[in-house]
Image (tube, coloured by chain):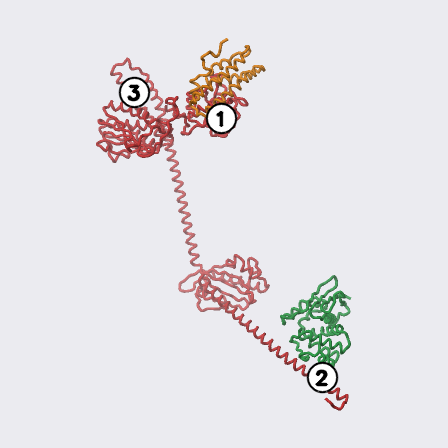
Amino acid sequence: MKGVIFSEMIRWVEECLSPAVADRMIVGANLPNEGSYTSVGNYPHQEALAMMGQLTQITGRPVHELCQDYGYWLATRFVELYPQMFGGYTDALSLLRDIDNKHNTEVVKLYPDARTPAIIASVDGEDLVISYASHRPFADVAFGLVHGYIAYFGQSDQYMVSRDEDTPGPHAARFIINRA
Amino acid sequence: MPDFHQAGDAAVDIEQVTSLFAGLDPGTRQLLLDAAQRDLAEWTDLLVAAWDSGDADGQHRARHSLKGLCGNFGAAGLLALCEADLAQPGMAKRLQASRITTTQALEQLIAKLDQ
Amino acid sequence: MAVAFDPRIANLEAEVELLTRRLARAERSRAEAEALLEDKSRVLANANRELRANREELRSQLDQRARQLLDAQQVAGFGTIVWDVERRMGELSAHAQTLLGMPGVDAFDSLSIFDGLTDPEDRQSLRDYATHMIKRAVAVRAHGQRALACPKGHADNQSCSACPERDDCGDVFEVRINPGGGVRRTLRLRAQVHIPADLGKVLVFLTIQDVTAELAAAREAEELRQRDQQRLAELESLTHDLEQARLAAEQANAAKSRFLAMMSHDIRTPMNGVIGMLQLFDDAGLSDDQRRTIGHVRASSEQLRILLDDIIDLERAEAGKLILNPQPLNLAEFLRDAVGFWQKVAAEKGLAMTLERGVFLPGQKLVDWISADRYRLRQLVDNMLSNAIKYTRAGSIRIRLGMTGAGTARYEVIDTGIGIPEARRRELFQDFGQLRLDGVGEAGAGLGLAICRRIVELMGGLIGVDGNPDGPGSRFWVELPIAEVPPPQLKDLPGTLLLACADGRRPRILVAEDVETNRIVARGLLGRLGCDVELVNDGAAAVQRAASGGIDLVLMDVSMPVMGGIEATRQIRALPGPEAAVPILALSAYSRPEDLEPILTVGALGHVGKPIRIEELHGAMARILQPAVSDDA
C-alpha cells in the first residue's frame, strides 16, 4: 500500500490525538521500520492494521470508528496533496462519480503495479451508488473519505450518505448517496 | 351372272405386282403387303356396311378407295365387283370372297419374289 | 535507568525520548524518500533518454524520407516548393531549383523572385494563382478547416492519403518560363494546401513538373491525328468513288448480258423456225444440186444455231448462272455415243479417230458409273472433238482417257493439225477470243473453248493445251475430279434419269394420301426416282407440313377425309411467305378435264393418274423440278 496512507495516518494521530499517542502507537505496533514511512514508498498494509490495532487499545474506540475518522480527515489532505485531481469540481457528487476513473488511473500511472480498490460509481434513479471492493479491509476509511469529500464541498446538508447493510465490510461496501 | 374369277385367272396382275414390289427392299415389301391386306379388308367392309345402312355417300367413298387399291395391283376381279350392284342377292358375299382371294394371291406372289 | 523519581523530569524525559524518536523517524523517512526519489529519478532519466533517442530516430527517418522524396522527384522530374503560410517563407527543392534555373536558391520570401523568369504573358495569371492558393491556405489556417483545402472535402490527412485521386489533386496551373540560356520551358504547377499532422502549420505544397516535352508530344500527336483523319477521309472518298465505279461496271455488264440474252433469243426464235422447216423439208424430189444446196443450208443453219447456243451458254456461265446437274452416267455408253458420232464426221474428212482407254496409270481401270452432267460433259467433248477435226487437215486424232490417280481422270485430244503457237495458247480459252490462222478453212467465233473452260471450271477441273508430243499438232487436255457412283437401280426405266431439283438436290416430296397402301406405293415409287418422301394422311396435315417449308413438290390426293385435296391446295396457296408457291400435283383416279378443273383452279400445276405409273409420275415431276433442262432438251 502506498506510503501516503501510512504517513498520513501517523500525522492524523499526531494532530487529532497527540504526538505521545502516535509514539505509543508506533512503538506498540512493533513495526519493522519503526514507523519511518515516506509517502513515495510502498509498505505492507498489515502494518497499518497493526497500528490501528494499537490505537484501538490506546483509545478504547472501535477500529471502524477510528477508520472512518481517519478517512474523513484524509479527504481534506488528499485535496491539499493532489490539487490536480480535484480541480474543476464544484460538486461532491460529480467528483464521486468520477472517482473510479480518476483516482485509480492516476495512481496506476505512477505506480503501475498498484492494486487499487475496485470503485464503481453508478446512478440509480436519483441516487449515486458507489460500490467499493478491495483485498484490503479499508471500507470504513472509504466511507470516511466520502463523508470528507462532501464536507469539503460544504454540501453535508445536501447529501446523505448511507451504507448498504447487506454488503458486509470491511473489504466491500456500498455507499448510497442521495440528496437530503 | 359373270363369274368374276375365272379359273386360271390370277386375282392380281403378276407383272404389275412384280414391278411394284421388286423395286422395294424386303422390309418395305412386307409393310406394303400388310397395309394392302388391311386396307382391302377395311374398305370392303366399309362398302358393305354403307350399303347395308343405305349410306350413299359412304358407298361412294368406299367404292372409290377400293377401286384405287385394286388399281395398284391390277386386281381386276375385285375391281369389277366394286362396281357391282350389291342389291343383287349374294353379291356382298362374293365381294368379300373376292377380297380374300385377292389378298391370298398377293401373299403368294410376294412369297415367290422373296425367294 | 534508576534515577530520583521526579514526575516532571520523568515527563520531560519521556517527552525528549518521544521527540528523539520522532526525529529519528523523520530522518529515516527523509533518507528513505531520498533513496526512493533517486531511484525514481534514475527511472525518469532513463525514460527521458529513451524518448530522446526515439525522437532522434524519427527525425533521421523523416530526413531519410525527405531525401528519398527529393530523389524520387528528381527521377520523376518533379520539383517541390513548400511555402510556409505563417512564416511567409518558401523552400525550393534541388530539382525545383534546376527546373527554374535558380541553382543554390534554397529559400525565398517573396514571389517577386520569379517575375523575371516568367513569360510576360503568364506573369499576371501566375500571380493570381499564387494569391488564390495563399488565400485558401490562410482560410484553412483561420478556420482550421482542412476541408477547405481539399476539393473532395476530406477533413484530415488520413482521408487525403487514402483518396484514390490523391495524385491528381490540387489546383493545376501551367506557366511558361525562360530559365535562361535560351531555354524555354513550360512548367506544370500543382498546389495543395497541406497541414502536417504534428507540426501545426499550414503549408502550400507545390509540385513543379517540366511538361515542355509532354506538351510538344501532345501537339505532335494531335497533328498526326488530324493528318490521319484527313487521310482517312481521302481514303473513304476514294473507296466511295471505286464503289461507284464498280456499281457502274456491274450495271454495264448486266446490261450487256441482258442485251445479249435478249438478242440471242430474238435471233434464236426465227432460227429455230428455219431449222425446223429445213428438218421437215423433204428432199426426196430434188435434183442432186438442189439437194447439195439444201445440205449446205442445213449445215449453215446448224452452225448458226450452235453459235447462238454457245453465246447464250457463255453468257450464262459468265453470270454464274450455269448450273451443273449431275446424274449417274455410264461412261462407256457415253463415250460410245459421243466419240462414235465424231468418228463418223472425222472419217468423212479422211481423218482417223481413235480412243485409248486406261492409258495413264496402268492397272487403274476407268470407272463404270460416274455422277456428271451428261449434257455439259457432252458439250465439252463435242467442242474439243469438233475443234480437232476442224483444225486438222490430214492425219489422225487420238483420244486418250484414263485415271491419273484416285478420283482424277484425264482426257486428251491429240491432233496432227496445224498446231497453236505457244504465245497464243492462253488466248484460246478466253471468252470471245478468236484464233485466225492462215490457211485454215473454217473460222468460227472461237467460243467453243471458252465454254469448255467454263464447264471444266464448274466441274472443278483444269483444261489446257500444249503441242503434240509426237509431231505437229496440238494436244488439248482436261483433268477432272470424278467420283465413282454405284449404278442406279433403274432396271425398268431405260434411259430414265433420277429426278433432281434444279440445284442438283434430292427432291423432298410431300405425299398427302389417306389410304395407307397408296402411301406406301407412292413412297416406293418416289424412292426409285431418287426422292425423299414425307407422308401425311389428310389435307390439314398437308397444309401444316407445307407451311413449315423445305418441300419441293406436293403430291395431293384429291379425296381425303377431314380436309380434301382441293381445300388443302387452296389453303397452301393462301399461306404467307414463299411456302405458298410450292408446286402441287393432284393425284386422282379421274382424268377427265372437268373433274380435274377444281383442283387446277385452286393452284395445282398438274395431275398424275391413279394408280400411279412411274413414267407418268417422272414426267410430270421432271417438268416441274427441272424446267431449265426441259427447255434445253
Describe residue A18's horizontal placement relative to residue C234 as left or right. Answer: right
Describe the element under mark 3 as helix, strand or loop. helix
- Decide which of tag 2 and tag 3 comes sooner along the chain: 2
What is the count of numbered marks? 3
Describe residue C26's horizontal placement relative to residue C625 as left or right. Answer: right
Real-space Cα separation, disc 3 to disc 1, in angstroms: 52 Å
Which label was assigned to residue C535?
Answer: 1
Describe residue C345's horizontal placement relative to residue C619 as left or right. Answer: left
Q: Which residue is mark 2?
A: C18
What colour is chain C? Answer: red
**Contact, CB < 8 Å: mark 3 with mark 1?**
no
- Decide which of tag 3 and tag 1 comes sooner along the chain: 3
**Which callout, 2 or 3, points to the residue nearer the camera?**
2
Report crowding for label 1: few under 14, some 14 to 19, many 20 or more residues within 10 A (C-alpha).
many
Real-space Cα separation, disc 2 to disc 3, in angstroms: 174 Å
Chain ID, mark 1:
C
From what the image shows, is residue A161 above or below residue B51? below
Residue B78: percent from left, percent from top: 49, 15
Q: Amino acid at mark 3?
A: Arg
